[in-house]
Image (tube, rainbow, N blue to C red):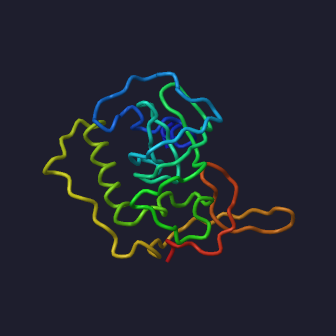
Amino acid sequence: MSGNARRCYHGGMPNNANQLSNGNQRESGREAPVRVGDRPTLTIDGLVGGGEAIGRLDGFPIFVPLAVPGDVLRAKVISTKPGYARALIDELITPGPGRQDPPCPVFGRCGGCQWQMLTYKEQVAWKTTIVREALERLGGIETEGVLEPCIPSPSPWVYRNKVHWATSRERGEWRVGLYEQRSHIVVDTPRCAIQD
């Protein structure tokens, strides 16, 4: 993994943070209109590579994990950088049209899946959108008439044949499961909704 990819995964700016939904680039380094601890109300307008959702406050991008397009939510800002901020859902005011209850009992704690709160049909559509935006913006490739929609799996659950299980021992008790996102903390995982 390159150093840039590692920084992005561990809290750096997602690759399309400079991309506005209207296709224009926003200026880099704009000072955040929010501070850590603020709780702005956001409407989520998209998803980005890496699994986070994006909402904007006066055009300023705020990345929110576990949110879906169309969600109206109160977000608690956890970090700010020049050009973007990160927040967590503090209160879901109105759920977006593609929101569903995740089938996995450890979803949101386990770092294995990012989009189980989104219907599978919407997941596939957003994957196509993310690929198209990356090809056009980063690669300078016109995708109209070339890029086909992502092909959905015949089975969105119980399909993965390989999972890297982690173990840890805490207070004399063994845990077996998957890591929390961006950590080495093992989430005790009684079953995995995508593993065969």
Residue 168 at x, y percent in the picture:
75, 62
Which residue shows up at 47% across the image and 57% down it?
95
Residue at left 42%, top 23%? 28
What x and y, as percent, mark residue 9? 53, 43
Q: Quadrant of residue 61?
A: top left
Q: Residue 194, image x and y in percent?
A: 49, 71
Q: Is residue 104 above or below residue 85?
A: below
Q: Which residue is drawn at 58% across and 57% down?
A: 111
* Front-lying residue, 24 or 92: 92
Residue in the foreground of this view, choosing between 158 and 94: 94
Give the total of numbered labels.
Answer: 0
- Taking 133 as reference, is 156 left or right? right
Residue 167 placement, left or right of 34: right
- Tell me: 89 left or right of 127: right
Identity of the residue furthest to the left in this view: 145
Horizontal and vertical percent position of residue 171: 86, 63
Residue shown at 60% from the left, 53% from the top: 181
Instruction: Establish if 34 lies above or below 102.
Output: above
Q: Residue furthest right?
A: 171
